[in-house]
Amino acid sequence: MHAPVLELRNVSKRFDMTQALDDVSLTLYPGEIHALVGENGAGKSTLIKVATGVYQPDQGEIWVNGRRVQIRNSQEAQALGIAAIYQEPMIFPDLSVAENIFISHRDRGLLVNWRKMYEDAEAILAKLDVNLDVRVPARGLTLAAQQTVEIAKAISLDVRTLIMDEPTSSLSAHEVAQLFRLVSTLRNQGVAILFIGHRLEEVLGIADRVSVLRDGKLISSRPRSEVTIDQIIRDMVGRRIEEFFAKSTAQRGELLMSVRGLTKENVFSDISFDVYRGEVLGLAGLVGSRRTDVGLALFGVEPADAGQIIFEGREVRINSPQQALQMGIAYLTEDRRQYGLCMPLPIAANVTLPTLSNYLNGLGLIRSTAECADAEEFRQRLSIRAPSVQVEVANLSGGNQQKVVLSKWLNTKPKLLILDEPTRGIDVRTKAEVHHMINDLAAQGLGIILISSDLPEILAMSDRILVMREGRQMGVFTRQEATQEDIMAAAMGQEYKMAERQP
Amino acid sequence: MARESSPTLQRLVNWLKSWEGLLLGLLIVVLIINSSAVPAYLSVGNQVNLFILYIERIIIALMMTFVIINGEIDLSVASLMGLAAGTMARLYEVGVPSGLAVAAALGAGLVCGAFNGFWVAFVGLPSLVVTLAGLITYRGLVWVLVEDRSISNLPGWLNDLGQKPLVGPFPLALILFFVLAVVAFIVLQYSGFGRYVYVIGINRDVARYSGVDVRRVKMILFTASGFIAALSGVLYAARLGAMRSSTAEGFELDIITMVLLGGVSIFGGSGSLRGVLLSILIILNLRNGMGLAYLSANLQTGVIGLLLILSVLVPNLARSAQARLARRRLALRTMQPAEEV
């Protein structure tokens, strides 16, 4: 065996509350495709960023070609022969293919020798066994072709370690096959490839070695020949301490919403489910599963193209958030800074925003006493830690901001509450409070759709769980029958016989 | 007792330290200098005269404050002043009854404003481009209407309204300004519509996700802006007793200066009418003072321009200084953890 090209030795990295990487050691050999898998938030992205110099590890060492190195930025990583390509190719659309390939070369003198550049670009593409016109602008290229350009760019820099972060997530099956041929070519030329992927069959089809990350720790690292899909899934979900109190099973009420065949072209298709009053329906899936898009469609932000929505027994079309709010649907977005809160405004103004018309007198002026009284009620009920409701939300902590968003939507007195990652980026204590509140709301007869990447959270909070993968519905599990393994398997695209039973 | 009053006092102190406080200080300095140089400087008559010179632009500045806080801009207002004045003058010239001619002028403002609003609100084009096109197009229409003549044959009652005091020393335009200023202040600070104007300016996505009808608010703003511009155009012609194709050319920049100097952010979402009113007072009195000191009009404009740069620079500097201070405090605290808690 050759000497390793890149070694991470006992690397740790911590961000505030979360241990993103915990004593991780990983070795890459030339001519090897090393697959790295793990749930959302397992630490894969952090690992890539440490290897490419974007982050500095708190502890641990990085060795390249048998020398200990420090990588302070991506230029230094490049100089060491390490490059990464991402899901979304970073292409300058108005430059030609050749210019994109050589974009990082800065030592070419004052004038560009176009002929030489085109020839060199063609030579690199030929080495990769790819046929592309190097003179056309990159704009018109397919995503797959753009990725090829990215790879060529890395080759032009004489890369020895190529990190590929979910490169297949937006490619068609045919394009994936092409990409894999290309990756194999690189391997045969002695490049070490760290391949991060979500589709297990795919990953196992190409990898020589498979490593699993979970909660920032390296769980296993085995040769391809010694692993099975089931084993990998078990490693990915593991057994975690139940950090949630037992869900109080609320009395399921009458049918609130029925969705049949909901479709948005090129986004999601044929999504069907029911939500009952007093029930929490979990929406599980990995990045790119399009869960959020279903939420946005139900709230009228990005309406669906086809399918049927029956709300409280009436068939409805939801074409705008105004309509959704009028019907009694509220949607807590995943990004509260961008979509949830007006940061410079006080708590009170944020809480009453969707229902402001209820606070106006005959002249259209805001009845500020009523506004403050209602906001104050929420401040106490959700124990928002702020001296008064006149405090600007920009001055609150993340957890308290999340409570303000929650107050804002509860104040619309919704019948259906869609929660998109309601506990992302908030502290443990607030997280528990939010979970408690979800239980309470369900007990009061609200229908709740909970979108979350946190598998234990989904399992602990939901009565039923709908699993999505790349815009398609993979199955609906009841709380009793679902295990982390089942859900992960469905989210990764394993065909499961456990047919959905809408009770 | 002293404790109870301290939050209010604190707020007052904070306000005085803000840009608006600085404007107030500057205004007081200018007023002191001017009134020590000219005996009856602060008399009502003198101040009224100052205001009247700019009154049409001042009225439009009230409306422009709404538009800019909303995160948009309307560059077409001065061309619309010209278009309204031209429409009115031309129609009266060809024998249309004076009342109808004025109504048509105001109607033209409404229609053109709504036209601007349509492209911005419903098609989603940037208002900078849409209203720049408006600036050119509407001015072009004035030239088509009036060509290179000067029309001084305006309705007599309109000339009277424009040139003679209506109540006490105040002509119609000034009274209109007082009324509009009060209405605008109440709408912006205390009404649901005003809240929407701010929220959309702060973050349009948040507004949309909260069920705010963003398009409706923008449509209303641009339509109102067109109407107010037309109204001011008619008032301007009435005050001068004449109009020509170049009437009010370039006024949009004076108007936007008044608004921005008042501390309204060009990016939308922040600022207040209080600041804009202060900035109007400063511009009027500073220009007048500089005139008294025999500074040329060009130099006066240069000073106003410098002030405008300061209005952006000072709050930014203050903010970064504050942040540095906070960081230093934090560093001190973390260095001596035992002393805290």
Image (cartoon, coloured by chain):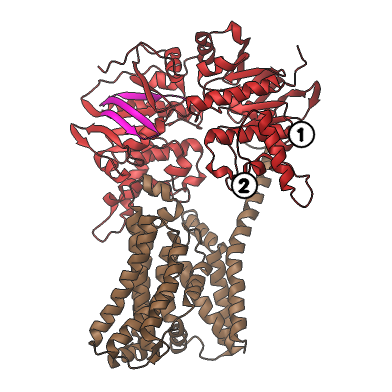
Chain colours: A red, B brown
Identify the residue shown where x is 55% and y is 70%.
B23
Question: What's the magenta bit mostly, secondary-structure-wise?
Answer: strand
Residue A55 visible in this rendered orientation of the protein:
no
Q: Say what secondary structure mark 2 lies in.
A: loop
> If the image is split into quadrants, where does the C terminus of chain B sit?
top right
Which residues fall within the magenta stretch?
A259-286
Identify the residue shown where x is 45% and y is 87%.
B49
Dot 2 and dot 1 residues touching (CB under 8 Å): no
Say what amino acid the circle numbered 2 marks: Leu
Residue B256: % across, % down: 49, 70
Q: Which residue is mark 1?
A: A79
Identify the residue shown where x is 62% and y is 32%.
A85
Disc ID at residue A40 = none
Instruction: Classify residue A235 by image quadrant.
Output: top right
Say what amino acid the circle numbered 1 marks: Ala
The chain letter for the residue carrying disc 2 is A
Q: Which residue, as the protein is rendered here, is positioned at the far left?
A: A313
In front here: A334 or A398? A334
Residue A272 on the magenta segment:
yes
Instruction: Classify residue A129 by image quadrant.
Output: top right
Identify the residue shown where x is 39% and y is 75%.
B80
In-image side of B135 versus A363 (left or right)? right
Q: Which residue is mark 2?
A: A95
Residue B256 visible in this rendered orientation of the protein:
yes
